Image: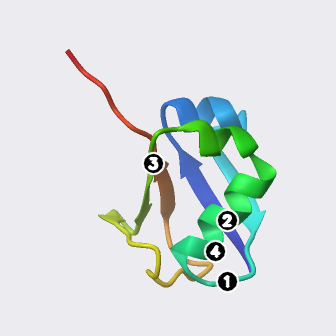
Amino acid sequence: MQVKVLAFGIAKEIFGSSSISIDIESNDTDGLKNALEVKYPKLKELSSYMVAVNDEYANDKTPITQQDEIAIIPPVSGG
């Protein structure tokens, strides 16, 4: 299944774009993270990142469909 993923912050730099399309084998966020880390190994170097599905933070077993809005939220630091 192919899904569209929005990227913010450092994730946007890693992907080279503010959105990408990627094929995933498993229709959950764990499968998405695995596919992203294979295609974009620098993503694994982040201390952590979150996946949001339809404007809500997702856990590793949150189901994903092609119609979902998916976003990668990198760690945020502030002062």
| Residue at 64 percent of width and 47 percent of height | 19
Residue 7 position in % (x across, y down): 55, 44
Residue labelled with disc 1: 26
First along the sequence among labels 3 and 2? 2
The image quadrant of residue 43 is top right
Please state which of residues 6 and 32 is positioned toward the viewer in this rendering: 32
Q: In this view, does 8 lie above or below 60?
A: above
Q: Is mark 3 on a helix, strand or loop?
A: loop
Residue 55 position in % (x across, y down): 34, 63
Residue labelled with disc 4: 31
Please state which of residues 79 and 3 is positioned toward the viewer in this rendering: 79
| Residue at 72 percent of width and 33 percent of height | 16
| Residue at 80 percent of width and 52 percent of height | 39
Whether the residues at callouts 1 and 2 have beta carbons within 8 Å, the answer is yes
The image quadrant of residue 64 is bottom right
10 Å crowding of disc 2: few (<14), some (14-19), many (20+): some
Residue labelled with disc 2: 34
